[in-house]
Amino acid sequence: MLSFNLPDTDSVLKQTVETRPKAVVQWLDRLPFASPADVAQQLVMALFTLNRHPLAEDDRATLLALYRPAVQRVAAGLEARLVEAGVPPHAQLRQAGALLRELHIEHSLGYKQVLLGLTQRRFGRATARHVAEAASHLQAALRDLQMACALTHTPPPAGLWQDLHQVQTHVQEADLADTASDDTPAPSLPYRQALLIARADPLRLSNAELLLMRQYLDRFAALATLVPAPVPGHHGFAIPVAGDVPPSHLPPEQPPQRWLDTDALCRHLHDSAARLRAGESPHRIGLPSDINVDLTRRLFQRLLKLWSSGVQRAFRRFATSGSNLQMVAGVSAIHRLLEQSLPQDSTPPGDSDSMSIGDVGTTQAMPVMVNATHWTVSNDSAAGLALSGTPDAPLNLKVGDPLAMGGSDTGGWALGVIRWVVMRDARQVELGVERLSPQIQPVWVQPMRGRRKVAPEPALFVPGIAALQQNDRLLLPRHLYQSGLDADVWHAPHHYALTFGRRVEQTPSFDLIEFSIFADETP
């Protein structure tokens, strides 16, 4: 028996609801889709009133079919704005994220009423096709709400997974889970997509990676199949049917009642990554032709682990007593922070194209002062830690951003990288941080492309750790790295020339690379 948390009807809104399909079409055609936020506000209000107006399920389904393309179009516009959004977001991006979530909430409420009405019809019996279509649209709306929460780094609303699971159970019992029509996929497909999104640990993905993963799932999620029990020798994971919980990387305490077999999907991921590595175009292997190939390969490698056997934590984490630390994010901001502590005569290089190693140290405008933000350590481990805080201003923090971390009683700064980020409410931010190095130093890097030098740019020197057999490395802004490229480096008080070597790690914000020095002109 389906059970949804639905809004009560409101007689006050009755006169403001447009229920004539022709009038709704005309209104939708007049909406200014060039302004996604404005259109989203109007659609949210229209769906809000419609969801609180008594209406027969067939009439409601007809109206929602008219609204659905507009919802999808404006949601795509809002998502495009959120690709580069960080946490906490600026006011306009915060509004865009809130509108995106509200839009999908109201859209899903409409289809909950349709599906409930069809299954509880007193007179006559709803056709199997209509029930399957309503269930499919509802599962898709809930999946889109899940994605909106991931893009805005907010927890999913209570009841989301309970609704997803119970709708799937209902269509399975009615033998409709795999019933598709000409323009509507089977109800189990958006459910499988939601399971795979959750299993991918979306809070650990950048927004660009999230949207790329969704593009992949739109084309290939059908390769994953729902089965009642694990298939010997196949990849897959258990699905918790009861409760309001997504699939977990922890082994189930009891034999699973539902299992997602990902064997064919993982084989396709592996094959696609190999073909991209071999230089095949994305279009030839069924992927969008405009994707970032490097980003796609890294994402596929991660998804292959998460969708097959999963990734277990390497070190236990321990709760702390609320110790505090200071933090600065971003390569350039960390560079300015470290230079603030250098002697005043340790000036950065100039930006002349003809500058040689011996010319560094020329005058430049004083850097802008950097103020660190304060955070509380929630738990700690050998590899990383979790932080929480309520920053007063938008910081635009993103997964993959480098961090300088230091306690108030220490003089040095350690290097870390954001692995996940979530907003618990309008102000409370939580971060998962991996430690990269206990020390960092500011450097200026001037790549030499051909015979011409470009302007020097801030970067970070990461000292090696002999006990880990780790060499010295450079952390570069994302756009600088090119394998085998020569560069001049000013590393006070040293001046040297080096060649970029192997890339150790790549995120949307930086490249961590090895290097080899071939000329040292330190005075």
Image (cartoon, rainbow, N blue to C red):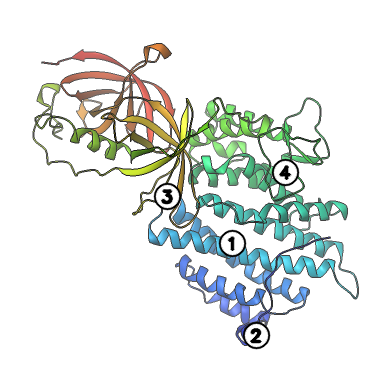
Instruction: Say which label, 1 or 3, has the lower sequence index.
Output: 1
Is 198 or 187 nearer to us in this picture? 198
Q: Residues within 10 Å of mark 4 (few under 14, many from 20)?
A: some
Is residue 491 at all visible to an observer of this figure? yes
Is 141 or 469 nearer to us in this picture? 469
Q: Point out the image quarter for the C terminus.
A: top left
Quadrant in the rendering for residue 475: top left
Distance between the alpha carbons at the discs numbered 2 and 1 = 26 Å
Distance between the alpha carbons at the discs numbered 2 and 3 = 39 Å
Judged left or right of residue 502, residue 341 is left
Q: Which residue is denoted by mark 4 in the rendering?
A: 222
For residue 134, above or below residue 265: below
Q: Say which mark, if any, is on residue 72.
A: 1
Q: Amino acid at mark 3?
A: Val
Instruction: Say which label, 2 or 3, has the lower sequence index.
Output: 2
Judged left or right of residue 124, residue 416 is left
Residue at position x 34%, y 54% in the image: 392
Q: Amino acid at mark 2?
A: Lys
Q: Which residue is denoted by mark 2 in the rendering?
A: 14
Judged left or right of residue 213, residue 268 is right
For residue 435, above or below residue 431: above
Quadrant in the rendering for residue 255: top right
Q: Amino acid at mark 4?
A: Ala
For label 2, the SS is: helix
Q: Which residue is denoted by mark 3 in the rendering?
A: 87
Residue 127: image location, x then y, percent: 87, 66
Q: Residues within 10 Å of mark 2 (few under 14, many from 20)?
A: some
For label 3, the SS is: loop
Q: Amino acid at mark 1?
A: Gln
For label 4, the SS is: helix
